Amino acid sequence: MMSNRWLILADDLTGAADCAIAFGRRGLAAAVTWDVTTSGDVSPDDSRPLPVLAYDADSRGLSASDAAERHRGLLERWLEPDRVLFKKIDSTLRGQPAAETAATMAYLMERTGAAFGICAPAFPATGRTTLAGHVHVAGRPLEDAEVWRRDHTYASANLGFVLGTAEIETTLVPLSAIRSSDLASRLARIAEGGPGVAICDAETDGDLARIAAASLAVAPVPFFIGSAGLAHALADTLAPAPTGAVHIPPSRSGSLIVVGSLAAASRAAMRRLAAQDHVVHLPVSPDTLLGDLAGRADLAARVAAVIAAGDDALVEIAIGDALDMSLGPRLARALAEALDPIATRIGAVAATGGETAAALLARFGIDGIRLVDEIEPGVSLGLTLGRLSIPVATKAGAFGDAESLIRISERLRAVRTQGSFS
């Protein structure tokens, strides 16, 4: 078996969380942080080593050179010799995965003299697969997907091309090889060829399980490049550890649920949740967030009234398809600033989109999440660390279906009213 100590380095918050909870569900203490002052050596209760540390590098919106520099600095700070490295990349290749992977390999070569990566970004539970080294969504090339049309960095979703933009040597391991009996020896031979990355096809969770098991035969231990699908497969190679129930004081205050993602999946789920009993829909426009102080104060007052009544406040950043994508970070920060005065009254919080979640939690004085469970693939559940200690759920914007936010709302309601995550 592999080491029980892992460093997950992600380019956004939701990705860090949905990878770390894979290990948390095996009984390993796992937390996500984005605050460089947080210690990676201790768990949230400060009494025992933290086996799984996930760090949000917040690098998705950076240039290639800035993202690479940030990753190198974080590796220097957090990658201890006994931790296995999981370089989390977006399953639809947003951000700068090539530059970040190249920086990771350069750092590993300097420190250990070896840098062999196994790349498998497939996440079959959310419709992401890899065939012939090419990323697919819902059975079609990624280039046909909404998320690619809205935001992409590269000219192609072929992983060999993507990593090649950073001059990384790659070897394709096709699906036939993934399902063959000699996969372990094949990966070991590729590793012997020197610094490089094995790009692994995967169409099912079973394929990812084969990749994870075969990786055990590679020495020294490779680093991994992928999304939560691969994280779950790797976690399943570890022996489960006993885990205790997590309890909190019950709360009558309602949940704050924020939808800041442009993804159609999140917008559809928002409409379904808005129609539920005990949910109050509160849309807010970009103009209000960016320039209307009275409107922002009114939003905070309305949210406070809703959650005081024990209902859920569903706050929608009401953005149209023509929105300038560069406004996204400003809108997320402005919403966080508007709601900060009422943060201590919130019973639980959920956010779609890593950028929105990170801005909201950081402004509320939260510097980490102790991960407890997974509501559904790509939706992690935990307890906030820092100024507030409340249940929190995070979801990538493009994940889930029309019922996802309803399931999140119901689970948060059960946790906060019963005082138990069980």
Image: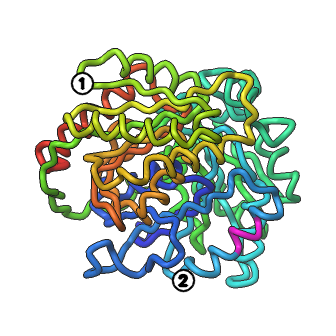
Q: Which residue is depicted at the point 39% across and 24% down?
A: 281
Q: Tell me which amino acid carries mark 1.
A: His
Disc 1 on helix, strand or loop? loop
Front position among marks 2 and 1: 1
Q: Label 1 belongs to which residue?
A: 278
> Which of these two is toward me, 361 or 5?
361
> Which quarter of the picture shows residue 285?
top right
Residue 361: say if magenta: no
> Which of these two is toward me, 51 or 269?
269
In this image, 145 relative to 245: left or right? right
Q: Looking at the picture, does residue 230 appear above or below residue 185?
A: above
Label 1, residues with CA under 10 Å away: few <14, some 14-19, many ≥20: some
Q: Label 2 belongs to which residue?
A: 81
Residue 400 rendering spot, x and y as whole percentages: 46, 28
Q: Which residue is depicted at the point 54% across and 75% down?
A: 36
Magenta segment boundaries in residue numbering:
68-72
Label 2, residues with CA under 10 Å away: few <14, some 14-19, many ≥20: few
> Which quarter of the picture shows residue 320?
top right
Q: Looking at the picture, does residue 288 appear above or below residue 119?
A: above
> Which of these two is toward me, 27 or 408?
408
> Which quarter of the picture shows residue 43?
bottom left
In this image, 24 relative to 325: left or right? left
Q: Tell me which amino acid carries mark 2.
A: Pro
Label 2 and label 1: CA atoms lie apart by 50 Å
Disc 2 on helix, strand or loop? loop
Residue 70: say if magenta: yes
Q: Looking at the picture, does residue 347 appear above or below residue 273?
A: below
Q: Which residue is depicted at the point 59% across and 72% down?
A: 219
